Image: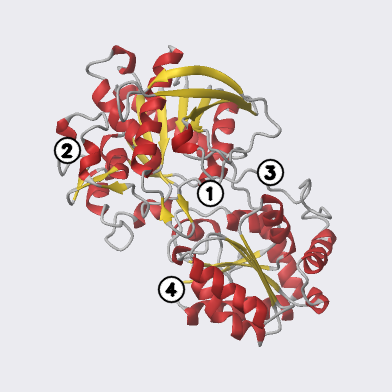
């Protein structure tokens, strides 16, 4: 069995989170540690990091990194979350910012390449400084994708890394960290990495490609998405590279952290409930209706929820497009998220137009996300693609019926109506017409078949998407890698 795994990630809940990556990295290392595999996490020390309930101490001062110029150093802070040590890479000019990756108005930070090249090189320096070689370095998404590449080229020349295996997990292949070729020259990789079989991608420096090419194993976050990204439609230009690694590509479904997302003991809810006693869900609905200033009559009508990034991938434009039709169905709509200003503005205008029936909160707060999951009757996920999705898992646990596209992890986690084991409603194409028709079916089912609705709700609440299963699959991959080294 591997002796220790280091997870390297740009987000880790509850310290930093912009989406599912943060949730995954808050849960997976802890679950892995519970299996008996010592784990640790390396992540940036952002200016907006949440440290309120945790003791954070300076662990290393002036760690030499040498990028983008020789004397540059990092400070490293250490904390512990559920028994897992977390190491935070600190360099103020790179990470002390309000947002993690971009300004919502101005777009991506101009120096994102430098920021995360620095982060990856600092992670390598930190692990060497700690003195004991990790058995596995498990990097996540483009921000950490250079770790497998660095270790691949370090193994022959530095005995510290000789027996360290690497795993690279793609959470979303559309986000690749694609930058100018000039940034390659000082990134720390040797010249032979610059070719069509390395990090070069149509003349650019592609960080995600580096993780795919050089990791000992590549994983993604659901079995269906692992198949989809091998195709031109979903591979975002990297399908050819991924097909070359197909024998070492695995789809492992994410788990849900039920210690955080569980209506039986959720501290954010005004009233808790369970699969045996659902009465509290209605009280949560009535509380949210009051909190958001919605029409009290909605307590007896379906309340539809959307939580996610307001971007095209998540289909928020489709939701906005069908809201006038939904109003004619006498339902309520609540939405939480942030993203493209035009989508935010559009749903805000709809809220003004249908005051008391539509409520949109621009931004994200963890407590409101929990209350919306509990209060909603139907949860909307019209994603154009969805590598895994966690919010539909949360919706099922909270007794909220998902309406979702048959894409990626949504296909792997929702049993479609009208089957006997149905837990939600599925449609095949991310189009306004299909979304609207499927919502009509869900609303009719909710309204006309209360007994069937109760059965489906309870069926969904009993579904278990635990990290135990995912840990076993990751452990099998770790063992295979170790045998090959």
Q: Check contact, mark 4 vs mark 1: CB within 8 A.
A: no
Q: Between marks 1 and 2, how big is the CA–CA gap?
A: 32 Å
Which of disc 1 and disc 3 is earlier in sequence?
1
Residue position for label 4: 429
Give residue 194's mark. 2
Q: Quadrant of the C terminus?
A: top left
Dot in front, 1 or 2: 2
Which residue is nearer to you in this view: 443 or 39?
39
Q: Check contact, mark 1 vs mark 2: CB within 8 A.
A: no
Could you tell me which residue is drawn at 33 percent across and 55 percent down?
229
Dot in front, 4 or 2: 2
Could you tell me which residue is drawn at 61 percent across and 58 percent down?
363
Dot in front, 2 or 3: 2
Q: Check contact, mark 3 vs mark 4: CB within 8 A.
A: no
Q: Secondary structure at mark 4?
A: loop
Mark 2: give few (<14), some (14-19) or many (20+) Cα within 10 Å. some
Q: Between marks 4 and 2, how big is the CA–CA gap?
A: 39 Å
Q: Between marks 4 and 1, how big is the CA–CA gap?
A: 23 Å
Decide if residue 270 is on the left or right side of residue 362. Answer: right
Q: Is residue 133 visible?
A: no
Q: Between marks 2 and 3, how big is the CA–CA gap?
A: 43 Å
Q: Secondary structure at mark 2?
A: loop
Name above or below for residue 37 compared with residue 310: above
């Amino acid at each position: 069995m591997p002796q220790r795994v280091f997870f390297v990630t740009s987000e880790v809940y509850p310290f930093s989170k912009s989406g599912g990556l943060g949730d995954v990295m808050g849960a997976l290392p802890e679950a892995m540690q519970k299996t008996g595999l010592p784990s640790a996490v390396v992540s940036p020390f952002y200016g907006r990091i949440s440290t309120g309930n945790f003791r954070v101490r300076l662990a290393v001062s002036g760690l030499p990194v040498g990028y983008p110029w020789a004397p540059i150093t990092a400070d490293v802070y250490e904390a512990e979350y559920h028994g897992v040590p977390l190491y935070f890479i600190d360099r103020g000019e790179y990470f002390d910012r309000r947002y993690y990756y971009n300004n919502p108005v101005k777009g991506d930070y101009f120096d994102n390449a430098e920021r995360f090249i620095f982060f990856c090189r600092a992670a390598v320096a930190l692990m060497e400084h700690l003195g004991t070689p990790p058995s596995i370095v498990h990097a996540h998404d483009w921000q950490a994708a250079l770790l497998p590449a660095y270790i691949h080229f370090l193994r022959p020349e530095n005995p510290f890394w000789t027996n360290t295996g690497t795993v690279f997990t793609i959470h979303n292949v559309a986000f690749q960290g694609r930058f100018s070729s000039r940034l390659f020259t000082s990134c720390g990789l040797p010249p032979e990495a610059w070719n069509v079989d390395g990090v070069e991608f149509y003349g650019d420096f592609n960080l995600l490609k580096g993780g795919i090419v050089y990791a000992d194993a590549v994983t993604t976050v659901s079995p269906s998405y692992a198949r989809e990204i091998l195709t031109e439609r979903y591979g975002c230009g990297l399908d050819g590279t991924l097909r070359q690694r197909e024998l070492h590509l695995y789809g492992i479904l994410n788990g849900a952290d039920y210690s955080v997302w569980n209506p039986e003991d959720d501290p954010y809810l005004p009233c808790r409930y369970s699969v045996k006693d659902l009465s509290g869900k209605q009280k949560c609905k009535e509380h949210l209706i009051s909190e958001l200033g919605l029409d009290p009559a909605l307590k007896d009508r379906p309340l539809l929820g959307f939580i996610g990034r307001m971007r095209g991938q998540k289909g928020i434009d489709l939701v906005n497009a069908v809201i006038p039709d939904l109003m004619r169905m006498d339902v309520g709509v609540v939405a939480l998220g942030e993203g493209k200003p035009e989508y935010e503005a559009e749903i805000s205008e709809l809220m003004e137009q249908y005051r008391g029936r539509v409520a949109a909160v621009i931004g994200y707060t963890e407590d409101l996300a929990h209350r919306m999951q509990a209060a909603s009757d139907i949860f909307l996920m019209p994603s154009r693609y969805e590598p895994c999705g966690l919010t539909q898992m949360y919706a099922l646990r909270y007794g909220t019926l998902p309406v979702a596209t048959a894409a990626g992890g949504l296909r792997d986690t929702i049993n479609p109506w009208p089957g006997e084991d149905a837990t939600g409603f599925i449609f095949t194409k991310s189009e306004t017409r299909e979304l609207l028709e499927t919502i009509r079916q869900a609303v009719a089912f909710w309204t006309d078949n209360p007994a069937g609705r109760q059965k489906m709700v309870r069926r969904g609440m009993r579904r278990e998407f635990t990290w135990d299963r995912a840990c076993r699959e990751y452990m099998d991959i770790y063992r295979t890698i170790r045998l090959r080294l």
